[in-house]
Amino acid sequence: MKTIVTMPGDGIGKTVLPEAIRVLTAAGFNANYIHADIGWEFWCKEGNALPKRTIEILEKHKIGLFGAITSKPNFAALQELDSSLKDKGYVYFSPIVGLRQYFDLDICIRPCKSIKGNPLNFIRRDHEGFEEPHINAVIFRQNTEGLYSGIEWTNPPKIVRDAFETHPKMKSFKNIKNEDLAISTRIVTRNACRRIIREAFEYAKNYGYSNVTICEKPNVLRETSGMMLQEGKLIAKEFPGIQLWDTNIDAQMMWITKNPEIYGVIVAENMFGDIISDGFAGLVGGLGFACSANIGKDVAIFEPTHGSAPKYQELDPPIVNPIAMILSACMMLDHIDEHQISSKIRNAISKVIIEGKIRTFDMLKLKGGADVFAKGAASTFQLTDEIIKNLSN
Ligand code: NAI
Ligand code: MG
């Protein structure tokens, strides 16, 4: 039997993760679930939002389901730290970013598929009226480097400034005082490029997509985006049935409302991947539907794209949409080759959406709050129950 590490985390992560497990169990997936601590509570109590014991559990069992965590700015983090830990040099860092880095989870996959009947689906005006394109794009986001590599300075040390001064373009900044200079680096390495692009092509091949788009900006970011595109062209030769397209990130944001239905798999660096995946998610229902996988060579962690939505965490019964978490659990099933069970769950979700009787507040475009039930919204539990009911139909 598989062992799955469950990390509910904070806020609505604690609500949606057990719902996903309810669905997995009802769909016939038998597993051992081991809880692991992560999130704000452990920062406050222990000065570490990602305790070492959690890392060890993941090291052992390799597959994790993650809910969401709460992050707060530095001053709030220090204020809420247990008094016995104050002034001891503890520094808060985001535990999910920590997990991605520690386990080198460099492949982030974010499928954005419209589910028929979802009232939040993107519609577009055409010459006769309105049309609803079927969107089925899967974003492959490089998850460990690029603009999010974390190598940045305000008031950079002299040795860094001196190194930068060797670049001819630094002449335009020569009169800027060091304390007025902020630098964030965009680092791209050839191996990481190759890995994300090859994974994207493999995925296209395995799941029948006809095109892979490298979405970068090589005309301006000549080195980093240039390397992505160059590697893309080489790898594309190994996949003769799949077309390689390339778009610029800015133009891509325009294309996603003009013709989102033509895109299959899209590959991008960390920041650009973050941007396009949110853009596409907005076309297919938003955060209540956006699922993701973080995959490394050894460990894989599956999580909804959304955060802990603290403003809804106290509501009882809960109102949030569990589908993003349940779809993330389906990605986990695919990862371990339990394709039959994942299709069964996705089909059940499709049936519930198309039937349209049971909908959480987001699908009804209501403002979140305890009054959504009076306005016809279902609770998180009712939506999960309905999905489970449809597993067998
Ligand atoms: P958020 O994703 O928690 O919520 C933004 C808004 O999206 C919510 O107010 C709600 O209207 C909607 N929403 C989110 N999930 C939903 C669901 N399942 N069903 C229906 N509506 C949903 O992002 P926000 O408010 O920016 O951040 C809240 C906290 O979450 C912060 O502490 C932030 O640092 C953290 N966060 C954690 C992430 C993670 O765990 N990977 C990702 C993003 C934010
Ligand atoms: Mg998340």
Image (tube, rainbow, N blue to C red):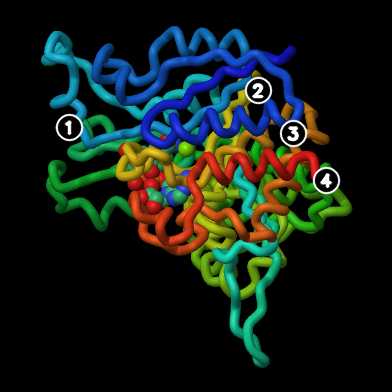
Q: Looking at numbered disc 3 in the image, what kind of residue is underneath it?
A: Asp
Find the distance from the CA under tag 2 to the CA under tag 3.
16 Å
Quarter of the view holding residue 374: bottom left
In the image: residue 14, left or right of residue 130: left
Q: Position of residue 391 (x, y in %)?
A: 75, 40
Most extreme residue toward the front is 374
Residue 214 seen in the current view: yes
Q: Nearer the viewer, mark 1 or mark 2?
A: 1
Q: Looking at numbered disc 2 in the image, what kind of residue is underneath it?
A: Lys
In the image: residue 32, left or right of residue 239: left
Q: Nearer the viewer, mark 2 or mark 3?
A: 3
Labelled disc at residue 334: 3
Label 1 with label 2: CB-CB less than 8 Å: no
In the image: residue 291, left or right of residue 339: left
Label 1 with label 4: CB-CB less than 8 Å: no
Helix, strand, or loop for circle 1? helix
Q: Which residue is mark 2?
A: 297
Mark 3, Cα crowd under 10 Å, few <14 / some 14-19 / many 20+, is some
Quadrant into which the C terminus falls: top right
Pointer 2 or 4: first along the chain = 4
Find the distance from the CA under tag 2 to the CA under tag 4.
20 Å
Q: Which residue is mark 4?
A: 205
Residue 349 position (above or below residue 69)? below
Residue 379 position (above or below residue 253)? above
Helix, strand, or loop for circle 3? helix
Q: Looking at numbered disc 1 in the image, what kind of residue is underneath it?
A: Ala
Pointer 1 or 3: first along the chain = 1
Q: Which residue is mark 1?
A: 76
Q: Position of residue 108 (x, y in %)?
A: 58, 38
Residue drawn at 66 percent across, 79 percent down: 131
Pointer 3 or 4: first along the chain = 4
Q: Nearer the viewer, mark 3 or mark 4?
A: 3
